[in-house]
Amino acid sequence: MTHRIVVTGLGAVSALGLSVEETWTAARDGVGGIAPMLFDPGPNGPEGHTTPVAMVKGDALAATEAALGRRVGASLDAFGLYAVKASHEALAQAGLVGTLGARTAAVYGHGFAGLHTLEEGFERFYGRKAARLHPLTVPKVMVSAPVSAIAMEFGIKGPVFGVTSACSSSGHAIIQGSALLASGMADVAVVGGSEAINTPGCLRAWEGLQAMSPTTCRPFSEGRDGMAIGEGAASLVLETLEHAQGRGATILAELTGSGMSSDAFHWTQPSLEGALAAMRPAVDQADILDAAQILISAHGTGTPLNDKNETQAVHALFGDRAKRHPVIATKSLHGHLIGATLALQGVIGLEALRHGLAPAIQNYLGPDPDCDLDLVLGEARPIETDTLMLNAFAFGGLNTTIIFKRWA
Amino acid sequence: MATLEDELLDLVAEEALIDRAKLVREATLEDVGLDSVDVVSIVFAIEEKYGAEIAEDAFKNTLNLGEFVDTLKGLIEAKQA
């Protein structure tokens, strides 16, 4: 038995704002959230350093408590708090708050865990030699904390679990959630991802990998020199078409294709073959190989290797049709949310389809012959397509591609 | 200026997400909904804020919030003396 899968709710928290509306408006207007920030590890660490990151804009705790109508306090790490806020927004849009139970699933993706809580706890332990860690350290840090918090907050009693695949985590979460619906194991699935890893120690670890830009994220640009890490979350409410129509829900889009692959090759180098092995089945399933226009929300990290490889993959897949398709790279606005990035790019991409406008790539310095795609540059560009293609290619070689079609 | 007791009750309300108005000396920990994890969270926050060191069993014989706060005040004042 298989079911068609539709989207009925969206939610977002990022450096662009605390709602889908704020996120879309900032993306459309090119008001990015990447800025230099001082990370001070305190008296027991090395000197602080300043690096470009994209932190959540606004008071997420106050916004969450206002949305839920109750206190949350320090019971959640940031990556749990953002997940609950984004899921509340998505479920409220879907009209499902207070109605969920055993036929609802929740699947959420994260590349890491509650690193703010973990790093503060370990600074206390190793740095200040304090034997006692905060009693909620384990439930705040564990990778499944956000999805448990979502389940508890909204009464979700069906299949609930976290998934992890670095930068593809929310792609895998969306695909796993859709598979639960397609197979009949649930009627509704809250899916997405969250990440909050901008801590003094973690950022030094990323710098060790030589993947971080000292300036900003410039996808597909000449002179691009790496990524900027963002924090936040994004959620989508998926339903079977029958369930959504049966309750008279407003349908936003249909999930028409998905692909997953593993490079089985290298920790940090991308693979053309691996990227294509995720993109091709998704495009075939959605039957869009000959489409007149597709909005491609690229993985577009701003690293020299990713953007070159992704360009080659788009050309290899679409051939002489490759340049029909406008390419956006919104990490130049909200940074790289790692495990949450595909979900957030999905929310922005679905808003782009709804408004008929593709948000421009920011921080672009000039053309790179290795990145000869129809890049959306300058200002938001009018588009005439109902189809969105999302790519995520993770360190460790784990790839996902998802296709959404706007509901007519 | 807030007394130390007021400060401590504010902190209890903040850490355990309890309505501040419910925190009166006569109430038992159970009455106001403080469980063992809440107590450790409060102890943790007090250690952070006041630099006091509080043993795991400091509240073993505590009957109500008044005694709880008195024990905390004693430990903080001993640290500050």
Image (cartoon, rainbow, N blue to C red):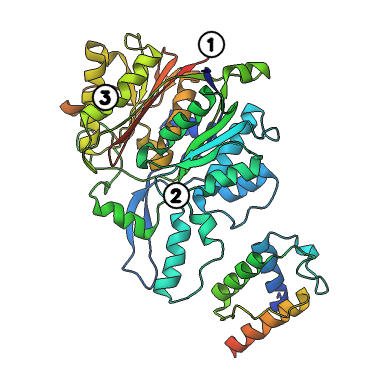
Other-residue count near label 3 (Cα within 10 Å), few / some / many at <14 / 14–19 / ≥20: many
Residue labelled with disc 2: A196
Which residue ends up furthest to the left in the rendered image?
A369
Q: In front: A280, or A182?
A: A182
Badge number at residue A408: 1
Of helix, strand and loop, which one carries label 2? loop
Q: Are marks 2 and 1 on the same chain?
A: yes
Look at label 2 and name its amino acid.
Answer: Ala
Mark 2 in CB contact with mark 3 (< 8 angstroms):
no
Earlier residue among tags 2 and 1: 2
Other-residue count near label 2 (Cα within 10 Å), few / some / many at <14 / 14–19 / ≥20: many
- Residue at (62, 27) in percent of width and height: A94
Gap in Å between the C-alphas at discs 2 and 3?
29 Å
Gap in Å between the C-alphas at discs 1 and 3?
29 Å
Other-residue count near label 1 (Cα within 10 Å), few / some / many at <14 / 14–19 / ≥20: few
Residue B80 spot, x, y in % from top left = 59, 87
Of helix, strand and loop, which one carries label 3? helix
Badge number at residue A276: 3
Q: In front: A146, or A291?
A: A146
Of helix, strand and loop, which one carries label 1? loop
